[in-house]
Amino acid sequence: MIRKLAIACAITAAPTLCAAGVSGHAVSAHAVSQRPYTKADLSSWTGSPGTLPSLIQQIESTTGGRVVEIRYTDRDGKPGFRAAVAKNGGVTFLRISSENADSVEPGAASVPDRKLKWKARADVGQALRATVPLSEAIRTAEYESYGAPAVAAGIASSASNPSSDVQAYNILIRRGGATHRVAVDDRTGRVIANPEALANRS
């Protein structure tokens, strides 16, 4: 298990490069919700059950914010994680490296909610209204998946849809070389038997 990871940088609204080599352009493209699939290359994934919940707890303890989305990434061949943390009316986008890391450090800046696209603002709002913590939902999904680890998690991209009666987290589980979705109700903490009931719209 990856026990301690260091946050390499916080992606701010300014179009400058941070230590992890991510430009300001990535801010507008960075998700604050989780779709029912991932395009990430998971060939280098070495995590285990509890990796994401433990990382979320470290980030929230360090930053004082709430993680609304987190995912494993192998961008540019550099394994690590990306997370969106909501706090005080803003969202901080973090790049977390699993290499040569011994602590989690707070990010330096955040993007005000008003600078997010309307859909992202709605997603963050729904995530903050959830009564079940994301870390707890991930543990539930991993348990229901016979101990397989989660590689990504966040509020479902359809949860903020006004026409949706279901608000849930999408948890992506890696098992047997394949990735599948487990949807967990963000108000009751129960697994949704038919996740297709969630609209797959972003």
Image (cartoon, rainbow, N blue to C red):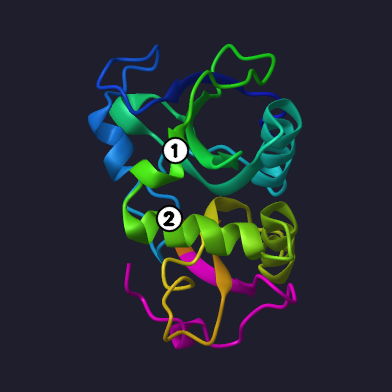
Q: Amino acid at mark 2?
A: Arg
Where is residue 140? Give x, y as percent.
73, 65
Where is residue 104? Give x, y as percent.
66, 21
State the residue at coordinates (74%, 39%).
57
Where is residue 161? Give x, y as percent.
41, 76
| Total marks in image | 2
For mark 2, what is the residue? Answer: 121
Which residues, given as a range, are shown in magenta? 180-202
On-image quarter of the N terminus: top right
On-image quarter of the C terminus: bottom left
Q: Main secondary structure of the magenta part?
A: loop
Q: Amino acid at mark 1?
A: Pro
Among the 4 quarters of the image, the one containing residue 148: bottom right
Q: Is residue 102 above or below residue 133?
A: above
Among the 4 quarters of the image, the one containing residue 6: top right
Q: Residues within 10 Å of mark 2 (few under 14, many from 20)?
A: some
